[in-house]
Amino acid sequence: MTAGRRVRVLLASVLGLALLAGCGPSGGHDGGTAAPGGAGSSRAASPGAGSGRPTAAGTPSAGRSGGVPRPAHVLVVLFENKGYDNVVGNPQAPYLNLLAKRGALLTNSHGVAHPSQPNYLALFAGATHGVTDDSCPHTFHADNLGAQLLAAGHGYASYAEGLPSAGFTGCGNGNYARKHAPWTDFANVPARSQLPLRALPTDYAKLPQVGFVIPDLCSDMHNCSVSTGDRWLSANLGGYASWAQHHDSLLIVTFDEDEGTGANRIPTILTGAPVRPGHYGGRVDQYTMLRTLEAMYGLPPLGAAAHRAPLTGVWR
């Protein structure tokens, strides 16, 4: 082979290697959203795409403004005084664990205080308003989620088991306890929106955009067993949970506090059409849940909720 031919062969080999290198995978990240963890796994909190601030319980859902959906309907139901490990995996709570399997289980969810009442106020108003016990009554002239939703033209109502009549302001009635109905404490929440559980529509399309459901002191596990509350949930909201899967709606099942530990770790489950099933490990609390509900409906964050990021990675 002549010297000139050897030079041409060498140049062709170098060019071929360069072309092959250009076709290989790059070392960069494509920015896509990771799939949620399966059963037994947990996704930690990670930064929101382009937001410059942390987001709770995962990464943002692709194709959503701000990573948060706007469901047609949301129901939030609160149970009482049971820690995460006393519910999740407990054979006495088959329905709750079914929802956890079908939906998003927040494995690092916490109450903000002990005892019960400050947690309800935190979820509804972004502040405990100096309440450190379960005393009653209280009256506040301050903003809150119910007033926000109504002022913005959205539907809102609460449904409490044992409430004798709409707008009842007594501290108790049988197993009904006002300390678990924080809206009663706010002068700007209309009495007509504070309803007995029997007023919950059976035609779920007639529900307001956001509603709270409060079981009584037995049904919420405060005075009765985990199995009692589990059966109550299946009987009273099982129909809605199934309906929500096919009607762009959401059920949030959470607790106020655990049994009094410093960790105050509680079960929180989300299920419905917008939810990506999985276990999510970002730390959340009642202020996080309030911030998420406000973000869904374009409302400004209240109080301590302004220092939380909304849930984003749990959505489809």
Image: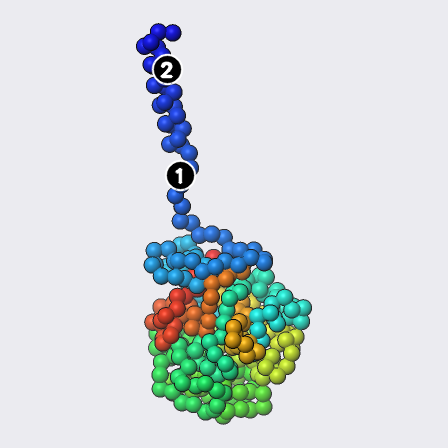
| Location of residue 151 with respect to 279 vertically, above or below | below
Residue type at mark 2: give it: Val
Q: Residue at x 50, y 72 (%)?
A: 110
- Ranked by sequence position, the earlier of labels 1 and 2 is 2
Read off the residue under disc 2: 9
Q: Residue at x 67, y 68 (%)?
A: 91
- Pointer 1: residues within 10 angstroms few (<14), some, or many (20+)? few
Foreground residue among 257 and 261: 261
- Image quadrant where one finds the N terminus: top left
Give the farthest residue toward the right. Answer: 91
Q: Residue 146 appears in which quarter of the rendering?
A: bottom left
Q: Residue at x 34, y 55 (%)?
A: 50
Q: Specify the label residue 193 is tagged with.
A: none
| Location of residue 288 with respect to 39 vertically, above or below | below
Q: Specify the label residue 26 is tagged with.
A: 1
- Judge whether residue 155 can be spotted in this image: yes
Rendering coords of residue 29 (x, y %): 40, 46
Rendering coords of residue 3 (x, y %): 33, 9
Residue type at mark 1: give it: Ser
- Judge whether residue 203 can be spotted in this image: no
- Pointer 2: residues within 10 angstroms few (<14), some, or many (20+)? few
Rendering coords of residue 42 (x, y %): 53, 59
Label 1 SS? loop
Give the farthest residue toward the top. Answer: 2
Give the spatial CA distance, label 1 vs label 2. 28 Å
